[in-house]
Image (cartoon, rainbow, N blue to C red):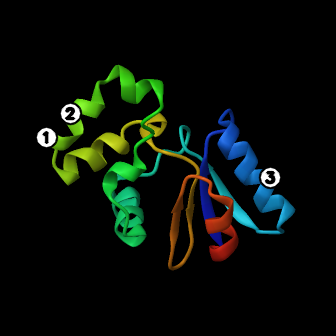
Amino acid sequence: MIKVYYYPRCTTCKRALKWLDDNGVECEKKHIVEEIPSLEELTAIYKKSGLPLKKFFNTSGLVYKNMGLKDKLADMSEEEQLKLLSSNGMLIKRPIVVGDDFVLVGFKEAEWSEKL
Protein backbone atom coordinates (compact mmCIF):
# COMPACT_ATOMS: atom_id res chain seq x y z
CA MET A 1 0.00 0.00 0.00
CA ILE A 2 1.22 3.48 -0.81
CA LYS A 3 1.97 6.07 1.89
CA VAL A 4 0.89 9.67 1.56
CA TYR A 5 2.58 12.31 3.69
CA TYR A 6 0.26 15.31 3.90
CA TYR A 7 -0.67 18.37 5.96
CA PRO A 8 -4.42 18.75 6.62
CA ARG A 9 -4.56 22.53 6.19
CA CYS A 10 -2.65 22.46 2.89
CA THR A 11 -5.02 23.09 -0.03
CA THR A 12 -2.82 21.11 -2.42
CA CYS A 13 -2.93 18.15 -0.03
CA LYS A 14 -6.71 18.42 0.20
CA ARG A 15 -6.98 18.31 -3.61
CA ALA A 16 -4.55 15.38 -3.75
CA LEU A 17 -6.43 13.36 -1.12
CA LYS A 18 -9.72 14.06 -2.91
CA TRP A 19 -8.11 12.87 -6.17
CA LEU A 20 -6.99 9.65 -4.45
CA ASP A 21 -10.52 9.08 -3.09
CA ASP A 22 -12.16 9.89 -6.44
CA ASN A 23 -9.84 7.43 -8.19
CA GLY A 24 -10.26 4.64 -5.63
CA VAL A 25 -6.60 4.65 -4.57
CA GLU A 26 -6.14 3.20 -1.10
CA CYS A 27 -3.33 4.67 0.94
CA GLU A 28 -1.85 5.00 4.39
CA LYS A 29 -2.08 8.66 5.38
CA LYS A 30 0.71 10.22 7.44
CA HIS A 31 0.31 13.71 8.95
CA ILE A 32 3.70 15.19 8.01
CA VAL A 33 3.93 17.41 11.10
CA GLU A 34 2.69 14.90 13.69
CA GLU A 35 4.55 11.99 12.07
CA ILE A 36 7.68 13.61 10.66
CA PRO A 37 9.57 11.09 8.54
CA SER A 38 12.77 10.03 10.30
CA LEU A 39 16.19 10.77 8.82
CA GLU A 40 16.36 7.15 7.65
CA GLU A 41 12.89 7.30 6.04
CA LEU A 42 13.61 10.59 4.32
CA THR A 43 16.96 9.35 3.03
CA ALA A 44 15.30 6.24 1.59
CA ILE A 45 12.48 8.29 0.03
CA TYR A 46 14.95 10.76 -1.46
CA LYS A 47 17.15 8.02 -2.95
CA LYS A 48 14.15 6.13 -4.35
CA SER A 49 12.78 9.31 -5.97
CA GLY A 50 15.81 10.10 -8.13
CA LEU A 51 14.93 13.79 -7.66
CA PRO A 52 17.26 16.60 -6.57
CA LEU A 53 17.08 17.07 -2.80
CA LYS A 54 15.94 20.70 -3.23
CA LYS A 55 12.63 19.34 -4.62
CA PHE A 56 11.82 18.06 -1.11
CA PHE A 57 11.90 21.54 0.46
CA ASN A 58 8.69 23.53 0.85
CA THR A 59 10.25 26.65 -0.64
CA SER A 60 7.03 28.65 -0.37
CA GLY A 61 6.57 27.88 3.33
CA LEU A 62 7.07 30.36 6.16
CA VAL A 63 9.54 28.17 8.04
CA TYR A 64 11.76 27.91 4.93
CA LYS A 65 11.62 31.68 4.42
CA ASN A 66 12.10 32.58 8.09
CA MET A 67 15.18 30.36 8.29
CA GLY A 68 16.65 32.02 5.19
CA LEU A 69 17.24 28.61 3.60
CA LYS A 70 17.24 29.95 0.05
CA ASP A 71 20.75 31.26 0.67
CA LYS A 72 21.93 28.50 3.01
CA LEU A 73 21.06 25.22 1.22
CA ALA A 74 23.86 25.49 -1.36
CA ASP A 75 26.45 25.48 1.45
CA MET A 76 24.91 22.53 3.29
CA SER A 77 25.82 18.90 2.69
CA GLU A 78 23.19 16.40 1.60
CA GLU A 79 23.24 14.87 5.08
CA GLU A 80 22.77 18.28 6.74
CA GLN A 81 19.82 19.02 4.45
CA LEU A 82 18.20 15.66 5.20
CA LYS A 83 18.69 16.19 8.96
CA LEU A 84 17.08 19.61 8.63
CA LEU A 85 14.10 18.17 6.73
CA SER A 86 13.63 15.44 9.33
CA SER A 87 13.59 18.05 12.11
CA ASN A 88 10.47 19.93 10.94
CA GLY A 89 7.62 18.58 8.82
CA MET A 90 6.71 22.10 7.71
CA LEU A 91 9.98 22.25 5.74
CA ILE A 92 8.97 19.28 3.59
CA LYS A 93 7.15 19.80 0.30
CA ARG A 94 3.87 17.98 0.29
CA PRO A 95 2.10 15.82 -0.46
CA ILE A 96 4.63 13.05 -0.90
CA VAL A 97 3.43 9.69 -2.20
CA VAL A 98 5.68 6.69 -1.63
CA GLY A 99 5.00 3.49 -3.56
CA ASP A 100 7.02 0.30 -3.91
CA ASP A 101 9.07 1.64 -6.81
CA PHE A 102 8.25 5.35 -7.07
CA VAL A 103 7.98 8.64 -5.19
CA LEU A 104 5.80 11.58 -6.16
CA VAL A 105 6.50 15.00 -4.65
CA GLY A 106 3.78 17.63 -4.91
CA PHE A 107 0.49 17.11 -6.70
CA LYS A 108 0.60 16.99 -10.48
CA GLU A 109 -2.54 15.23 -11.67
CA ALA A 110 -1.03 13.93 -14.94
CA GLU A 111 1.97 12.45 -13.11
CA TRP A 112 -0.27 10.89 -10.48
CA SER A 113 -2.59 9.41 -13.13
CA GLU A 114 0.40 7.77 -14.79
CA LYS A 115 1.86 6.27 -11.60
CA LEU A 116 -1.30 5.46 -9.66
Crowd band around label 3 with a 10 angstrom C-alpha radius: few (<14), some (14–19), many (20+) = few
The residues bearing labels 2 and 1 have C-alpha atoms spaced at a distance of 6 Å
Q: Which callout, 3 or 2, points at the residue further toward the start of the chain?
A: 3
Residue 40, labelled with which disc?
A: none
* Number of numbered labels in the structure image: 3
Q: Is residue 50 left or right of residue 103?
A: left
Do the CB atoms of the residues marked 3 and 2 lie less than 8 Å apart?
A: no
Give the amino acid at mark 1.
Asp
Question: Above or below — where is 37 with respect to 49?
Answer: above
Residue occupying image coordinates x 38% and y 24% = 65
| In the image, farthest residue toward the top | 66
- Residue 116 % position (x, y): 68, 73
- SS label for mark 1: helix
Marker disc for residue 72: 2
In the rendered structure, find residue 75 and report the number of the disc placed on it: 1
At x 55%, y 47%, the residue is 94
Q: Position of residue 63 (x, y in %)?
A: 42, 26
Element at label 3: helix
Q: Taking 108 as reference, is 23 left or right? A: right
Q: CA distance from mark 3 to mark 2?
A: 35 Å
Query: In the picture, residue 2 is in which quadrant?
Result: bottom right
Kindly indicate whether the residue at mark 1 contacts the one at mark 2 (C-beta within 8 angstroms). Answer: yes
For marks 1 and 3 on the same chain, the one whose residue lies earlier in the sequence: 3
Q: What is the quadrant of residue 85 in the picture?
A: top left
Going by the numbered disc 2, the residue's amino acid type is: Lys
Number of the label disc, if any, that sits on residue 18: 3
Secondary structure category for the residue under label 2: helix
CA neighbours of label 1 inside 10 A, class few (<14), some (14 to 19), many (20+): few
Q: Quadrant of the N terminus?
A: bottom right
- Residue type (three-letter) at the residue carrying disc 3: Lys
